[in-house]
Image: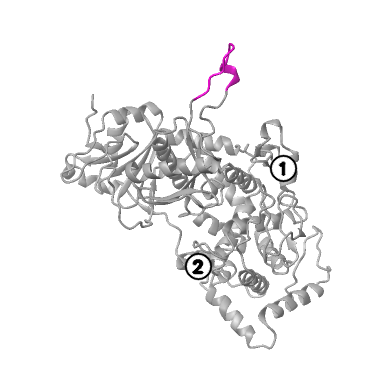
């Protein structure tokens, strides 16, 4: 029997608009008292970033987080709402199908509600009372999804209650707003923490990403029962920023998986299947079919592109309701393992994420990275450089991948396509670092370290955590942590690398001057990190230096060397780290 309430639910028409794909502005409303306890603990622990002090609460494995998030998404629905709707009546109507765990609203080409029920049966109950919309001039393709459209029967009766829904802008801050926030920070450590807080994925954004994957999984399951669509990359590795793309992995590994516990007797049953010449061709055929399905039958999926001849075949599309640009791949298990490794590194020490976000933001501000493929350094390469740098500290802040491998148990053993991807998954068995350097000190040292790194002969290797001779002639060589014969930065040319080195040296010099003339936090003059993120300031520094006879890069290098040589501690403090004197 249909539940009576304030409106009627209809499945969203599959003939969605096929116009220009736009990236919307997200404005989210999270309801009070609905954020999980572990999220609150994460926010509390983020306040301890300055010296790496850690929350001693037991940390969950990557696989445990993924499983919980996936189960959460399976009992969640996405509903397109009218702009004028009573939140109270809307939730009362939905609660007739079962208790609601939590919900939030956001805006993306209209108003949407993400509603999580306590039980999956509530979703089924809601689907059973939902009708397929009738069209006057077009025909709707019937598809029973968890993406709905709600209409009000009596809009005038609910207008007065519209004020109960308040929206907060939940996009990354503008450059101007970010500069203001950084200028009023009390220290450079506080600046890095502020940047992390403003750019990191929110709880609502993470939920929406898992829900989007779950909706795509519903579609793929029509062809491949028991398949799983998992998010990977920035969406799950703890280094994603608001607005980043959503990478998805279509996992077919559980389909027909042999289970010895369920077999008995003298016979062995196998599925009848189609055979193709290679696994790559099988991947291309699977993605081709899924791409067609998304294009023709996927509610809210627009701009579908099948890029099947790439090194890693994929389907690219925009999920208009969530606002995410999505890449769907299959047979890409190593990428999922890389996501888990970064998740572990990000969870081991609270300074890691703050430093990575800072370096990425700095690189983007100076056009060292780009969303367009080319010869630029990628965010993944920058993350590897930060991890390598933190492995080189004394004492090390992060362990090497080889050390994580020695801690692995039998359940952690993982071989993918002949590559050893084994490392410990239990974060609680990894001893925390005794290093207590501040973020300000680490930021200075990062720029000095890579401003003088011998890129012409050495490669970066987080598996061993030490410099090695380059096996090839590429300007920048960063070894892939699992496919060790690959260079993840092979696309970077000499010009872009030199630009990175010059900017690193200039940034180290600028930070050394901050110690001499640090303004009051109550002022509005850019200082510290705010100065580094202003390209105009860096350019003016460069132009001023060019008036002298020596090139900028050579002058900065000589300046740093002279400062170090004049240090009374002979460049080393009691912790064994290099120090830069700021005496005139």
Mark 2 Cα-neighbour bin, 10 Å: few <14, some 14–19, many ≥20? many
Mark 1 Cα-neighbour bin, 10 Å: few <14, some 14–19, many ≥20? some
Q: Is residue 538 left or right of residue 53?
A: left
Image: magenta residue range = 259-271
Q: Is residue 159 visible?
A: yes
Separation of residues labelled 2 and 1 (CA atoms):
39 Å
Q: Is residue 93 left or right of residue 21?
A: left
Q: Is residue 355 visible?
A: no
In this rendering, is residue 462 above or below 360?
above
In this rendering, is residue 445 above or below 238?
below
Determine the residue positioned at 60% across, 19% down: 260
Residue in the foreground of this view, choosing between 139 and 230 = 139
Residue 179 shows which numbered tag? 2
Check if mark 2's residue and mark 1's residue have beta carbons within 8 Å.
no
In this rendering, is residue 358 above or below 580?
above
2 or 1: tag closer to the N-terminus: 2
Residue in the foreground of this view, choosing between 542 and 255 = 255
Residue 268 falls inside the magenta stretch? yes
Residue 404 shows which numbered tag? 1
Q: Quadrant of the C terminus?
A: bottom right
Determine the residue positioned at 18% across, 42% down: 135
Percent position of residue 514, x then y: 64, 72
SS assignment at label 2: helix
Q: Quadrant of residue 556?
A: bottom right
**Residue placed furthest toward the top:** 265
Percent position of residue 268, x then y: 56, 18
Residue in the foreground of this view, choosing between 281 and 27 = 281
SS assignment at label 1: helix
Percent position of residue 240, x then y: 53, 52
Residue in the foreground of this view, choosing between 341 and 119 = 341
Magenta span: helix, strand or loop, mainly? Answer: loop
Q: Quadrant of the N terminus?
A: top left
């Amino acid at each position: 029997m249909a539940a009576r309430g304030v409106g009627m639910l209809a499945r969203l028409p599959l003939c969605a608009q096929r116009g220009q794909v736009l990236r919307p502005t997200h404005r989210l409303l999270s309801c009070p008292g609905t954020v999980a306890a572990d999220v609150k603990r994460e926010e509390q622990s983020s306040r301890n970033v300055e010296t790496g002090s850690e929350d001693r609460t037991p940390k969950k494995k990557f696989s445990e987080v993924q499983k919980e998030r996936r189960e959460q998404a399976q009992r969640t629905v996405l509903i397109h709402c009218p702009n004028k709707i009573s939140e109270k009546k809307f939730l009362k109507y939905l609660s007739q199908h079962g208790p609601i765990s939590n919900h939030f609203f956001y805006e993306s080409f209209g108003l949407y509600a993400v509603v999580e029920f306590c039980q999956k049966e509530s979703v089924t109950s809601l689907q059973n009372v939902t009708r397929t919309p009738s069209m006057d001039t077009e025909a709707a393709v019937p598809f029973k999804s968890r993406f709905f459209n709600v209409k009000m029967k009596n809009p005038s009766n609910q207008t007065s209650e519209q004020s109960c829904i308040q929206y907060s802008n939940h996009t990354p801050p503008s450059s101007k707003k970010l500069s203001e926030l950084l200028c009023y920070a009390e220290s450079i450590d506080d600046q890095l923490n502020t940047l992390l807080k403003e750019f990191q994925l929110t709880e609502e954004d993470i939920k929406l990403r898992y829900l989007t994957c779950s909706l795509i999984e519903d579609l793929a399951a029509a062809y491949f029962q028991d398949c799983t669509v998992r998010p990977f990359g920035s969406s799950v590795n703890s280094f994603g920023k608001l607005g980043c793309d959503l990478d998805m992995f279509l996992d077919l590994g559980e389909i027909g998986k042999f289970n010895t516990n369920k077999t008995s007797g003298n016979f062995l049953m196998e599925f009848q299947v189609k055979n193709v010449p290679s696994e790559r061709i099988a991947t291309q055929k699977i993605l081709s079919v899924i791409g067609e399905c998304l294009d023709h039958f996927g509610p809210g999926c627009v701009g579908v592109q099948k890029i099947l001849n790439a090194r890693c075949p994929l389907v690219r599309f925009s999920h208009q309701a969530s606002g995410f640009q999505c890449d769907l791949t299959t047979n890409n298990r190593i990428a999922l393992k890389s996501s888990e490794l970064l998740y572990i590194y990000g969870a081991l020490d609270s300074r890691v994420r703050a430093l990575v976000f800072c370096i990425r933001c700095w690189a983007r501000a100076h056009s060292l990275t780009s969303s367009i493929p080319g010869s630029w350094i990628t965010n993944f390469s920058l993350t590897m450089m930060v991890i390598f740098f933190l492995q080189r500290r004394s004492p090390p802040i992060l362990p090497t991948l080889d050390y994580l491998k020695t801690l692995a148990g039998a359940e952690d053993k993982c071989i993918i396509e002949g590559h050893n991807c084994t490392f410990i998954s239990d974060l609680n068995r990894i001893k925390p670092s005794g290093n207590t350097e501040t973020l300000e000190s680490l930021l200075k040292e990062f720029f000095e370290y890579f401003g003088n790194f011998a890129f012409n002969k050495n490669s970066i290797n987080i598996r061993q955590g030490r410099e090695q001779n380059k096996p090839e002639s590429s300007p920048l060589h960063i070894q892939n942590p699992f496919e060790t014969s690959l260079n993840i930065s092979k696309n970077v040319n000499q010009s872009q690398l030199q630009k990175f080195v010059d900017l690193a040296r200039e940034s180290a010099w600028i930070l050394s001057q901050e110690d001499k003339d640090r303004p009051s936090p109550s002022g509005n003059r850019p200082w510290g990190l705010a100065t580094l993120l202003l390209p105009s300031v860096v350019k003016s520094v460069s132009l001023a230096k060019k008036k002298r006879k020596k090139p900028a890069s050579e002058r900065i290098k000589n300046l740093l060397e002279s400062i170090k040589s004049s240090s009374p501690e002979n460049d080393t403090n009691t912790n064994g780290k290099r120090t830069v004197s700021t005496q005139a």
